[in-house]
Amino acid sequence: MAKHTSVLEKERPDVDLAGVDAVSTTLAEPLLREALGATLRGFREDSHRTLRELAVAANVSPGYLSELERGRKEVSSELLASVCMALGIRVSQVIIEAAAMMAFDAAAAELTAATPVEPVSVASH
């Protein structure tokens, strides 16, 4: 199972939040491509393979695979299947892991938003 890496902290200045309610703007949700990329990277690292090794095995350029792992490019179902086959895992494993990551990040954001912050007083000497 891949390591869970939160993708929620990333800022997305390109996302237009016009018309989105206040709760949604404070609870940013990761994009699917970001969660899939982080999940693929986790599985690759768990298998102790370099980006170049996996790229060769999956018949994709290392640069493109890097873009996928960083969540910069949308992955096609065919390419996802090729990368998964090269990793020796099922596409469903990657999708389930990515969905779990997204759910975990959303729950953490909701919990953080719902937790009141207590003011900290500093005693002077």
Image (tube, rainbow, N blue to C red):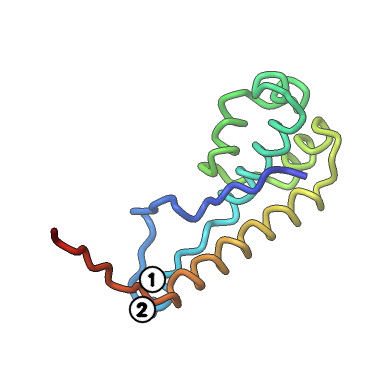
Q: Residues within 10 Å of mark 1 (few under 14, many from 20)?
A: few
Q: Amino acid at mark 1?
A: Thr
Residue beneath disc 1: 25
Q: Residue at x 63, y 24 (%)?
A: 61
**10 Å crowding of disc 2: few (<14), some (14-19), many (20+):** few
In depth, the one of 77 and 15 nearer the eye is 15
Camera-nearest residue between 90 and 101: 101
In the image, residue 7 lies at what x, y percent?
53, 51
The quarter of the picture where residue 25 lies is bottom left
Q: Residue at x 21, y 63 (%)?
A: 122
Circle 2 residue: 22
Q: Could you tell me how many numbered marks the image carries?
A: 2
Q: Quadrant of the N terminus?
A: top right
Could you say whether the residue bearing mark 2 is in a helix, strand or loop?
helix
List x then y, in percent, for residue 97: 72, 53
Q: Quadrant of residue 42?
A: top right
Residue drawn at x 77%, y 29% as measured from the top left: 47
Task: Tell me whether the residue at label 2 lies in contact with that at label 1, contact meaning CB atoms closer than 8 angstroms.
Answer: yes
Query: What residue is shown at x 64% (from left), y 56% (from top)?
Result: 101
1 is higher (above) or lower (below) than 107: above
Q: Position of residue 23 (x, y in %)?
A: 41, 78
Relative side of 83 to 11, left or right: right
